[in-house]
Image (tube, coloured by chain):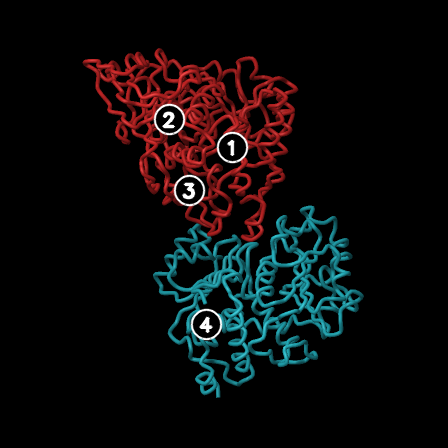
Chain colours: A cyan, B red
Amino acid sequence: MKRHLISAADLSRADALLILDTAEELAGLADRPIKKLPTLRGRTVVNLFYEDSTRTRISFEAAAKRLSADVINFSAKGSSVAKGESLKDTALTLEAMGADAVVIRHGASGAAHRLAGWVRGSVLNAGDGTHEHPTQALLDAFTIRRRLVGGSGGPSPRGNTVGARGAGLDGLRVTIVGDVLHSRVARSNVLLLSTLGAEVTLAAPPTLLPHAVGSWPCTVSYDLDSELPKSDVVMMLRVQQERMTDAYFPSVREYSRRYGLDAARMARLPEHAIVMHPGPMNRGVEIAAEVADSVRSTIVEQVANGVTTRMAVLYLLLGGTEFPATEFRAVAR
Amino acid sequence: MTAGNPGTPAETHARWLIRGVTVLGDGVQGSRVTDMLLSGGSVTAVQSGLNHSGARVLDADGLIALPGLVDLHTHLREPGREDAETVETGTAAAALGGYTAVHAMANTDPVADNAGVVEQVWRLGRTAGHCDVQPVGAVTFGLAGARLAELGTMADSAARVRVFSDDGRCVSDPLLMRRALEYVKAFDGVIAQHAQDPRLTEGAQLNEGEMSARLGLAGWPAVAEEAIIARDCLLAAHVGSALHICHVSTAGSVEIIRWAKSKGWPVTAEVTPHHLLLTDEFAVDYDPVFKVNPPLRTGADVAELRRALADGTIDCVATDHAPHPVEAKETEWAEAAFGMTGLETALRVVHQAMVDTGLLDWRGVADRMSVRPARIGRLTRQGIPLAVGAPANLTLYDPAAPAEAVVSAGASKSRNTPFAGMELPGRVLATFLRGVPTVLDGKLA
């Protein structure tokens, strides 16, 4: 694996499977009374957040702490950043403090990439502008595998709680719905899910798809209804407030009518299909409350899986290239 | 321009014998190796075996003599952003790149939208003495796109402004553009348009295409340039006024300009060195040194721009030299300033992109980098082929100099060259402005 995780394109299929399998090992930890491993004791992880994102920051913080790393939360608000310090100067400051890993969330596409050129430690992209959010894609893949890929490798009955180690998502049909143009979640998922063998379809109004989407490893549809019956996974994207006023679609009501997932649309899905959302949701816009709260919904699971998957990534970037299963089991017990 | 020489009398009156230099053909006669005598600011003899006593001798074996290069599009930043560039440093960079005249763009602070500022810039150029500085006047007050600047007053000033541009911004209001085009007819002016529809490029960062989609950067669509060019060509035809199109960057723009020229409309166009060599794929690492406006485009665009420069659809190369301090580029892509330096590398880039590819010979280079830009800029004493009686504005270029990596540190105050580390052929050995060397042996004289 590379030293940094900036784009889902940085991950080969083997890398991605190693992370998912490691996460599977670590998942057992969450059910134990003591949720902590000593693996990253003495290592420092900085959460550098230029955008408010409580859920992602907490997820990374929990992941690092469960691996016994020292965590420093650096929020751009109220810090030197608010006084106009450049990203480079902040990077040099973190470098001087000896950060082994920097988890960065930033409003500018490419910020994580730039940061990686200025620090020696590992850089984990926790969302950069409208570019990527690779750990979100990993936790989504992990969630899909746990739900839909059983030990035999084929779709399994709902309720399966252990993902099949070593298995990809081959042949699974994933439909990603909504504002793909501005979505870092969509970019990372298209790359990672296709690396893992899934067939990805983007369903969105043409205004919310990149002009060059034809070069992506996925298919495109403007008609959500025709995609639903053949989808194993439907992933709904959040509609950002500002898109609603910038002529991407005529009205929220029309968007919701054409691309929102309500109970009637959900009924068109195959029985085993799951519904995902990276959160936070706009209930009643891209997803109806009864869908979000249905048994198909993996939204709460995604949050839990986020911690596990981020532990795996931190472990592999900072701790080693392979998970020492026996050592881990001894400690965990 | 009719400016006198700022040099000392001894320098001014020194005669130079350029020995064994290759002088380009004129269409009747082919290129030949000969001697050239510069005296009193002019070329006074071009023939073999000149042996003029008292003249300083420059051995030009293997060197090509080009008429001094003329840049239609330079940002000298003074007044206002002397941390990025000054007239002194910018023109020194120009001389090192082989230029004897540059057009200084109007987007300074204060804006060059009045006689005071254009005369100040013009005088700073004369004082610096590295090359002629011809100020460009703003089309609208404060570049605000709302009402016309005092174009006639700038034209009548000591700076004798003929080229007007809001460069950096587009004159997007069609009525204002029409009026500007019409108005400058009174003094043989030309409007140089920065073609960019503002609504289609709000927040735009990079050419809209595969790279912008992948990198998650807001797209700058080709149509935003092409739509303005098409509109302005129609306006220029309607009012019969001279339109010059700055930094053409797309294959579609070329097609429109080709069509306009085929109608005989008074339209000229320029292309930058960077658009002749680089593509949007250079943005892959989010290094803002590759951030420029208009953005780097695709390989297909680069190929078409080269063809258009070769066949004359695009009249000239203009650098859009846009210096920025380090901190404006050592940042996130979206935060970074648009622009690249270019004066010191332009000729070498054109050598690589146009000559080494067989698209243009050296006579063609002289035409596209000196003769035509001088004509478009209404400079009567620049861009004149080197023959007896011509002003002694020339560049001696070694086309056989081994390719060397470009270094970012040069005479410019800024280091934002996208070519740093790239190997480019050729070397400018000397530049003469009215018979006085501004550059000798590749260094400022």
Relative to residue A181, is residue B407 depicted above or below?
A: above
Quadrant (top left/top right/bottom left/bottom right) for the C terminus of chain B: top left
Pointer 4 indicates a residue of which chain?
Answer: A
Query: Residue A196's mark?
Result: none
Alpha carbon of mark 4 to alpha carbon of mark 3: how far?
36 Å
Of label 2 and label 1, which has the lower sequence position?
2
Q: Is residue A298 visible?
A: yes
Query: Residue B247's mark?
Result: 1
* Residue at the disc numbered 4: A316
Q: Residue at (30%, 14%) from the top-left corner?
A: B47
Image location (x, y in percent) of residue A327:
43, 84
Q: Nearer the viewer, residue B54 or B202?
A: B54
Extreme residue toward the right, this view: A264
Alpha carbon of mark 2 to alpha carbon of mark 3: how far?
20 Å
Pointer 1 indicates a residue of which chain?
Answer: B
Alpha carbon of mark 2 to alpha carbon of mark 1: how far?
18 Å
* Mark 1 Cα-neighbour bin, 10 Å: few <14, some 14–19, many ≥20: many
Q: Residue at (56%, 83%) from the top-left corner?
A: A31
Query: Residue B99's mark?
Result: 2
Residue type (three-letter) at the residue carrying disc 2: Tyr
* Residue at the disc numbered 3: B418
Q: Is residue B400 left or right of residue B216?
A: left
Of label 3 and label 1, which has the lower sequence position?
1
Residue type (three-letter) at the residue carrying disc 1: His
Image location (x, y in percent) of residue B138:
51, 25
Q: Is residue B22 left or right of residue A327?
A: left
Q: Is residue B141 visible?
A: no
Q: Residue at (64%, 28%) from the top-left corner?
A: B231
